[in-house]
Amino acid sequence: MMGLVITQVSPSDGPFCASSFVMSFYVSKKNQADPPSADGLHLQKWGPMYAAVRQFSGFVSDDFLGEEAFALYLSLQRSNWASTVDQGRKADPTSAYTVAQCNSLFEFTGRVNEIWMLFSQESTNTI
């Protein structure tokens, strides 16, 4: 695994509004003390969190990301986790879903990607 690229996707509210995308890159431990700076970039530190995850392969494309997110949503609806994830997402609605790309762009086979639905810790005591 070369590095993790995470994209948080918040779909638009209307037919003429653009979706919002926030892209994040994992910085390795050895570079975390003094990460390189750049205009328009800021550091994010993520604490512990919960995520419902669906894994898929291939190159990530806007053409099918919605389908992958919907497949995750449907599988959750058929599980004991449905109400927990729904409640937690209402408490922390930062994005509709998050896409994690785990491979370098130069790796053409064996690619691993994930769709995440993040939810807050407060909702986890319902199961």
Image (spheres, grey):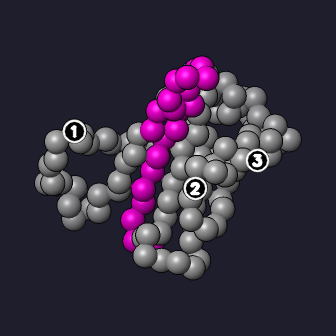
Task: Using the image, determine if residue 116 lies above or below residue 27.
Answer: above
Task: Using the image, determine if residue 109 lies above or below residue 120.
Answer: below
Tell me where residue 88 sits by quadrant.
top right
Name the residue carrying label 1: 40
24, 12: nearer the viewer: 12
61, 120: nearer the viewer: 61
**Outermost residue, right direction?**
78
Q: How busy is the neighbourhood of tag 3: few (under 14 within 10 Å), some, or many (20 plus)?
A: some
In this rendering, which labeled residue sits more in front, label 1 or label 2? 2
> Which residue: 61% across, 23% down?
15
Q: Is residue 113 visible?
A: yes
Q: Secondary structure at mark 1?
A: loop
Along the polypeptide, which appears first: circle 2 or circle 3? 2
Amino acid type of the residue that numbered disc 1 sits on in the rendered structure = Gly
> Which residue: 51% across, 32% down?
19
14 to the left or right of 80? left
| Residues rendered magenta in the picture | 1-21
Q: How busy is the neighbourhood of tag 2: few (under 14 within 10 Å), some, or many (20 plus)?
A: few
Q: Which mark is residue 71?
A: 3
| Residue 8 drawn in magenta | yes
Amino acid type of the residue that numbered disc 3 sits on in the rendered structure = Ala
Amino acid type of the residue that numbered disc 2 sits on in the rendered structure = Ser
| Residue 56 drawn in magenta | no
> Which residue: 68% across, 33% down?
85
Name the residue carrying label 2: 61
Residue 6, position as x, y percentages in the image? 45, 50
Q: Secondary structure at mark 2?
A: loop
